[in-house]
Image (cartoon, grey):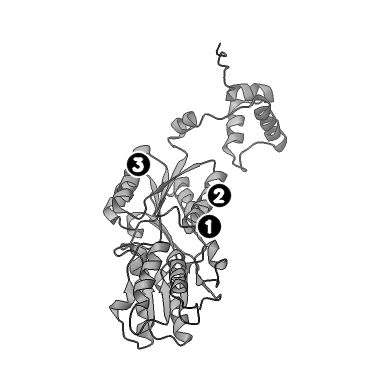
Amino acid sequence: MPQPRTRRPTQSDVARLAEVSQPVVSYVLSGDPAAPVAPETRQRVLDAIERLGYIPDRRARGLRQQRTFTIAGVIPDITNPFYPAFERGVQDVAERRDYDLVTYNTDGIREKELKAVRAVRESRVDGVIITPFHLTAEELSDVVRDGIAVCINGIPGWDPIPLGMDQVANDSVAAAATAVNWLLELGHTRIGMIAGEEGTFPREARVRGYLQALADHDLPTDPILVRSVGFTVEGGRDAARELLALTPRPTAIFAANDLMAMGAMRQIREMGLRVPEDVAIVGFDDIPAASLVHPALTTIAQYPEQLGRRAAELIFERLDGNMGSPGRREDTPFDLVLRDSA
């Protein structure tokens, strides 16, 4: 025989047990350290909450404050360790604010990006942090017009700042140029690039950095040395196979992310060549595995957790009363991490 449902404790129950008013309970539940509640009173409320097993009704709270207490993350590849680390940074900030985080994976496909944006608008989340590979400014402007705070991770092919969107980004052009300059300083003059998927914003920015470094050293550019593939290990293997079939073959390869760099390293070994003696490799992202592969991968570090935390902070600053303010851009650091592959 099913057990009768018991009544859930309410804020009124907590207030009675703690011998305070209901607004005092609301102050304590808000988590605001500046709320006008004496420390001993706050502790009585917390003790009552624990004793009763009180769980706040988020739906009712959302209706009162006209919020969903949810933010969304839209990322291109949940299997790339860079993005879970980025989302971890977002979640750390969201949890401190008693917000939920829902994540959409797009596989870097335009149709999936559009589907994620539709889901964000339909669910009326309070904010969204998105890494767009294909979306246009107008497509994301619709989200802002819905009253949803937007923060862009990375540098799309358009400027989000005038549109009221915030942005966190490192300079991918400068970072890529730094990676290629290191190979040039080592004496390499025929450098291949595994660039990622053609038409995506990260690919285009990192190719510009590659070309800039060559131009700064008065070296000609050879389109045959730039290979466009998926941002995956298999993409890196395929591109490396093509590059190493060239005559003369490149003596170094710059890959636009670490997964492609690791795929290239595997292909180089399978062809009986050595890294870095025969072919030097530099990657981009500094995912955790970069220091664990053999030889350890020289790469560009982007600090994804730091990026994610700052993106979330910008979202909450906007939600805290700056929804109508102009967009802001936060430039985040990058570093060339020297290891054994170059």
Q: Give percent across and percent down for residue 159.
A: 33, 62
Residue type at mark 3?
Answer: Ala
Mark 2 falls on what kind of element? helix
Badge 1 or badge 2: first in the primary sequence: 2
Which residue is the extreme one toward the top?
A: 1
Badge 1 or badge 3: first in the primary sequence: 3
Left or right: 221 as drawn, with respect to 321: left
Residue 287 vertical position relative to residue 39 in the rendered view, above or below:
below
Q: CA distance from mark 2 to mark 3?
A: 23 Å
Query: Is residue 169 something that shows in the picture?
Result: yes
Mark 1 falls on what kind of element? helix
Badge 2 or badge 3: first in the primary sequence: 2
Q: CA distance from mark 1 to mark 2?
A: 9 Å
Residue 219 vertical position relative to residue 6 in the rendered view, above or below:
below
Frontmost residue, 35 versus 179: 179
Q: Which residue is found at the position 40% from the left and 86% from the top?
A: 189
Residue 255 vertical position relative to residue 35 in the rendered view, above or below:
below
Q: Which mark is residue 305?
A: 1
Q: Which mark is residue 93?
A: none
| Dots 1, 3 in contact, CB < 8 A | no
Q: Which residue is found at the position 55% from the left and 76% from the top?
A: 340
Mark 3 falls on what kind of element? helix
Q: CA distance from mark 1 to mark 3?
A: 25 Å
Q: Which residue is mark 3?
A: 119
| Dots 1, 2 in contact, CB < 8 A | yes
Query: Is residue 194 something that shows in the picture?
Result: no
Q: Which residue is found at the position 58% from the left and 25% from the top?
A: 11
Q: Give percent across and percent down for residue 222.
A: 30, 81
Q: Which mark is residue 92?
A: 2
Residue 181 vertical position relative to residue 285 in the rendered view, above or below:
below
